[in-house]
Structures are given as C-alpha cells and as structure tokens.
Image (cartoon, rainbow, N blue to C red):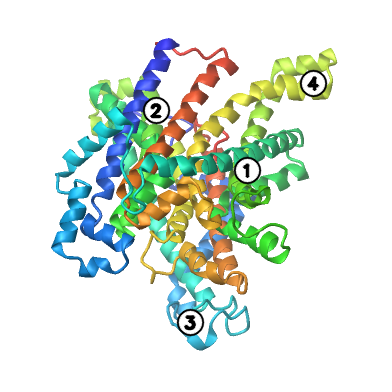
Amino acid sequence: MAYSINRTNRFQFSLTGVLDMARKIMKKKDMAISLVVLVIIIILTLFAHVISPYDPNAINLSNINLGPCSAHWLGTDYLGRDILSRILAGASVSLSISACVVTISLLFGVTIGCAIGYYGGILDDTISRVIDIFMAFPSMIFALAIMGAFGPSVINLIIALVMVQWTAYARVIRGQVLSIKEKEFIASVRTIGASDIQIFIRHILPNSIAPVIVMATIDIGHVILSIAALNFLGIGLPANIPEWGGMISSGKEFFTTAPFIIIFPGLAITLVVIIFSILGDGMRDILNPVDEGGEL
Amino acid sequence: MYMYIMKRLGFMILAIFVVSAMAFFLMNMVPGSTPVMILKYTVLGLENSATPNQIAQISSRYNLNDPLYVQYITWLKNALLHGNIGTSYIYNEPVSYLIALRLPATILLAVTSMSIAILIGIPLGIYAALKENRISDTILRFVTLFGVSMPSFWVALILLLIFAVDLKLVPVVGYGQVDNIILPSITLAIPYMAIIIRVTRTSMLETLGNEYIRFSIAKGLSKYRIIFVHALKNAMLPIITVLGFQTGNLLGGAMIVETIFDWPGIGNLLVNSIDSHDIPVVQGCILVIAIMFLTVNFIVDILYTYIDPRIRYGG
C-alpha cells in the first residue's frame, strides 16, 4: 500500500529515528548523565555475581553490624552479611521486578485502552467504569490488601502491582485513541482497505504511544518505591531475597547504633528513582506528547 | 450541575460497594482456615492444640460456616440496616468502634502534613517560577526531585536518627503531645511539598505569560498584587487537581508513616490487621479509607466549578 502519513508525534523505530533520539538526549545534560549512570547500574547488576566482594546471603556472625571499612566498603548487617554485595544483588531484584510490572501493565493497559477507545459502545462504558473503580482507590492500600491476602512471593508481588498499575495506561491510551480515531488519515487508510489490526498497529499505536512511554519510564521508579515500601512492611518478598526496602526494614532495629545499614540501601533506591524521573521528564520534552501537565 | 453531582454520588456508592466486596473476598482467599487463624492470634499456641469443638464454636460465633457470598450479604445487610460493619476477631470489639478510635489520629496527621506541604510548597513554587532557570530554580528542581524519589520509610528513619536520637529535640515515638506529630507530619509532607512546588511553578509560569498579566504590569499594579491576587488565583486549578489526586497517596503514605512512628491511626490498624488476618477490621479500614479518598475527590470536583467558572458540567 502506498500511503505515507507524516506526523510530528509519531514514534518511529527506524535507524534515523533512533539516531535522532540519541542526538536529542545528548543535548539534554541531565538526561545524558542519567542514562550513563543507568547503563553503569545495569552493567553492575548483570555482573553482580562476579564483582560482588561477598556472597550476598553469606552469614558471618563474627562480623555483625560492622561499620564501613576496607574489607566491607559499606559495612555489614545484623547477620554479618556484606551490605555492598546485598545492594548489588538487590538492584537486580528491584529493577527486574519493576521492569516486569511496568511491561505487563503497559501491554495489558494499552491493549484494553486501545480496544475500548476504538470500539467504544457498551464495552467502553463497562470497562471504563471498572477502571474508574480501580482508580478510585489508593493504589498502595490496594496492593497491600492483595499482598496481605496472597502472601509474600515474587509472582504475587508482580500480580498485585500490575493490578494497581494497568488502569492508568488504559485510561491514557483510551483518551489518545479517542482523539486520533476521528482524524482524517485514519478514515483514509480505512477507505483504502486497511484492516482493524493494521490500523491499530501501523497508525493508531505509533501516534498515541508517546505519553504512555513517558509514564512507563517514570513508573519504573515509582514501582521500585512501591516494592520497597511493601517489602519494608514485611509483605513484599520472602525474607531471604535481598531487596532494598527489606534491607532497611531489617536494619531499623539497629539504626541507632548502625545507621549505615539503612542509609546505603535508601540512597540506592533514591538514586534509581531519580534517574527514571529525569529520563521520563526528558522523554516528555523530546516526544512532546499531548499530556503536558506538571504532574510527576 | 445537579445531575452531575447526583451522577458522581451514584458512582461513589457503587465504588464503595465494590471495594468492600473486593476487600472481603480477597481476605478470604488467605490460605488456611479462618477459625485457626483467629485462635492463633487470640490465644497464642492454641491453634495447634485446639479441639474440633473449639474450632466449631468460633466458626458458629462468626458465622464462618456459611458460604462466602452469604457471609458477605449478611455483612452488607448489617452494615446498611444497623450501621454495624462487623466485630473484630482479635480485639472482640465492634469494627466501627476500633476505627472511630483511630480515625482522629489519621485525619490529624493527614491535615497537618497537607497544611505543611501547601504552606511551604506554594510559596516555593511561586519563587521558583519567578526565578525561572536561574540557580535557585535549578536547586529547587533537584530538591523536589529528591522529595518525590526518597522512600518515606527511609526519610522517617533518617529524621528519627537526626532529630530524636542524635539531637534529642523530639521524642522517638508517642502520641498526644505537639512534638509527637512533628516528625511524622514532616515525613508525610515531603513528597507532597515537592509535587506542589513543581505544579505551582509550572502553573504560575503558564499564567504569568498571559496577556492580562502583562496588561496589569503595564497598568502599574504592584508586583505582589499581580502575583498573589491575579496570577495565583488562576494558577490554583492545577494545584487543586493535584492535591485531590494525591490524597490517595497521602493515605497510602500515612499507612507507612503511622507504622514507623507507631501513630495510632487507621493505617497502623490496617497493617496490623492484615498481619493477623482480622478480616472484619481489614474490610472496615479499607472501606473508611476508600470513603475518605472518594469524598476528597468529590469535593475537589465540585470546587472546580467555583474556582473556574469556565467549567460547567453538562448533565
């Protein structure tokens, strides 16, 4: 089919598109720095088992609550486990669970949002009400209730967080699809015989995905915060999995005498969340999606 | 407008029903039988030695032998007809009493934090807008970035470490004195302050670029009058929207802050009840939190029309 439509907000997965994006990122100093730090963190995470000075779960009761020293750069916790090794191991836990949650929520939310926005009618009315009800509830408390019911495990944590995350994506993409499906170019591709699926994938999605990409980037950080908070309350992950929120929770009993046990994991969380915030904000400027609000 | 309010009220009631049902069925999916759980958390150790007779007694006391949906309908009937939302398995007190006991603490904490966030956030946001792209604006940007990115439980512990343990300015935990509320409310206020600063800044910048502001400057009105009377009034809409949205997060955050500071609020009760599988209390807390959140958003929606007469909802 020989049609081509040019729109400024269109998401392009071509080489020139990627290069263009890279140039724009390099122009924004804070974004470039964040990206470099993120890449370093990901590399450290991938090779955590090689560069970790100690086994993150190795208990050494003769070295408990040790302050930062040459053998243990960030000290040891109440079981004598090396904090640096645990932070490195925790990075892969937090990042991978968060990436999983955001990806699943995004796929689920975008599919539902596209479908209800495009077909409208009773399907839209019903599912929109369900989304309203989901969103009419503080997400943290919803996630807490689900975790409380199912008990701590990686899968349950992912399910609980996806259940509170997907609605926001569905709502945003629905709004986007609603405005785009009325545009003339959609009518024209339909006239030349494009199927619904083709219209979705080739025309509607590339033109409506930008705000969702921005949201997803920022959400990776927010989900890491939620994971940490749930784990801090003791209902996120099983106790043997090293995760930053859990590390802070286990250190809180000794924080008057050994504050470093809680300080470093907290800094790790803050750093990662800030990086994704800056990347998300930067993407918002670059992609210049319709959603321009000052919302964080 | 009237129709719109009725519609919103209808939705609120529907949402509250769904939320209460979800809370009930979710908590009943907990593995292990409820009577055993009740024994475990009321009489320590008894869950292993309990006779079938004792378990049957507990089951019949709380109607646990009925199918789940019957239990839910019974609960709903009691709630609607008698305002009775159940009896705690653990405390053996009416849930409404337990909640009424703790609600003031949560409201006090939420209102104090919100006030701190607004009183500091809006002026700083205006300041950042006036100093756009200058060094103080950039510093504020990083401060707000930290504000929303730090986990609240971590902030709470760090504040405790500095102000309660090292400097001994305030007591570590407690309730009832003025200095007890300082740290919990500051912890809870920090992310909201950051959000308010950012939204105020964006919103003020947009408003300050308008024609009528330039006209006011040309007319020779004083700078303060322009900023605080003309611009701020018009910049309020997005700020109020965000405040409404953030109430949910505030209540969620309160849960964590209350747990750390042992603040006797709803959040603390909820976390403890989830821990001990006290289903009626969990259901009650979730219900109350949902009602608070929905009410705030309802009020925000109505406020819109008063702040911005351009918005009028069709029926």
Residue indicated by mark 1: B194
Give the residue drawn at x 77%, y 21%: B226
Mark 3: amino acid = Tyr
Q: Which mark is residue B225?
A: 4
Residue indicated by mark 3: A54
Q: Is residue B277 left or right of residue B197?
A: left
Looking at the picture, tell me which residue is in the foreground, B19 or B284: B284
Task: Output the chain of dot 4.
Answer: B
Q: Please identify, in this view, whether the residue under mark 1 or under mark 3 is nearer the observer.
A: 1
Q: Are marks 3 and 2 on the same chain?
A: yes
Q: Is residue B17 left or right of residue A287?
A: left
The numbered mark, 1 or 4, whose residue comes first in the sequence reads 1
Secondary structure of residue under mark 1? helix
Indicate the quadrant containing the C terminus of chain A: top left, top right, bottom left or bottom right: top right
Residue A265 sits above or below residue B100 on the image: below
Residue B263 in view (yes/no): yes
Cβ–Cβ below 8 Å for labels 1 and 2? no
The CA span between labels 2 and 4 is 39 Å
The CA span between labels 4 and 3 is 63 Å
Image location of residue B207, percent across then percent down: 67, 23
Residue B163 sits above or below residue A66 on the image: above
Give the residue drawn at x 14%, y 60%: B53
Mark 2: amino acid = Gly
Residue indicated by mark 2: A175
Q: Label 2 neighbourhood size at 10 Å, few (<14), some (14-19), many (20+)?
A: some
The CA span between labels 1 and 3 is 38 Å
The numbered mark, 3 or 2, whose residue comes first in the sequence reads 3
Looking at the picture, tell me which residue is in the foreground, A44 or B6: B6
Q: Label 1 neighbourhood size at 10 Å, few (<14), some (14-19), many (20+)?
A: many
Cβ–Cβ below 8 Å for labels 1 and 4? no
Task: Output the chain of dot 3.
Answer: A
Mark 4: amino acid = Arg
